[in-house]
Amino acid sequence: MISAMKVSRSLRKLGDQIEDLTESRESHVLRTVGWVSAGVTAIALGLIVGREIRQRYKFNRRTPYDFYAHSGDQVQDVDFGVGI
C-alpha cells in the first residue's frame, strides 16, 4: 500500500512537470507568433506608407514633359474633352 502511494505521488509529480512544460511551450509559441505577426504588420505598414510618400513626391516633381507626354497620341475616347 505504501509503495502504491509513492508511485501515485511520483506519477502526480511527473504529470505536473509535464503540464508545466507544455504550458511554458505554449506560452513560448504564442509569444513567438505574436512577435512575428507584429513584425509582418510593421513591414506592411512601412511598405504602404513608403509607397504613398513616393507617389506624392513623384507627383509634386512633375516636369512639363510629364504634363504633355501623350499630347499627340491618337485617343479612341475623344468624348471627355468635347463637352458632351
Image (cartoon, rainbow, N blue to C red):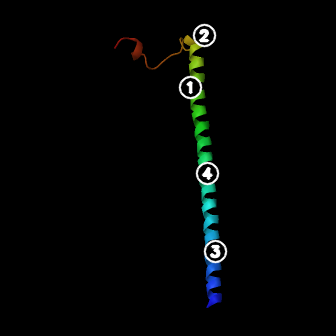
Q: CA distance from mark 3 to mark 1?
A: 59 Å
Which of the 4 quarters of the picture holds residue 60?
top right
Q: CA distance from mark 3 to mark 2?
A: 77 Å
Decide which of tag 3 and tag 4 comes sooner along the chain.
3
Q: In what element is the residue under mark 1?
A: helix
Provide the residue designation for mark 4.
31
Secondary structure of residue under mark 4: helix
Q: Position of residue 43 (x, y in %)?
A: 62, 37
Q: Earlier in the sequence, mark 1 or mark 2?
A: 1
1, 33: nearer the viewer: 1
Q: Is residue 50 above or below residue 72?
A: below
Q: Identify the residue under disc 2.
A: 63
Q: Please state which of residues 9 and 74 is positioned toward the viewer in this rendering.
A: 9
Q: Position of residue 42 (x, y in %)?
A: 60, 37
Give me the C-alpha separation between circle 1 and circle 4: 32 Å
Given this view, does label 1 or label 2 mark the residue nearer the observer? 1
Mark 1 neighbour class, 10 Å CA radius: few under 14, some 14 to 19, many 20 or more: few
Disc 3 is placed on an element classified as helix
The residue that label 1 is drawn on is: 52
Q: What residue is rendered at 61% in x and 76% in y?
A: 12
Q: Residue at x 59, y 18 (%)?
A: 57
Q: In this view of the protein, which residue sits in the foreground, 66 or 69?
A: 66
Quadrant of the drawing holding the C terminus: top left
Q: Which residue is most to the top?
A: 64
Q: Residue 76 placed where, x, y %? A: 46, 20
Specify the amino acid type for callout 2: Thr
**Mark closest to the chain's N terminus, 1 or 4:** 4
Q: Residue at x 36, y 11 (%)?
A: 83
Q: Amino acid at mark 4?
A: Arg
Amino acid marked by disc 3: Lys
Which numbered marker is on residue 13?
Answer: 3
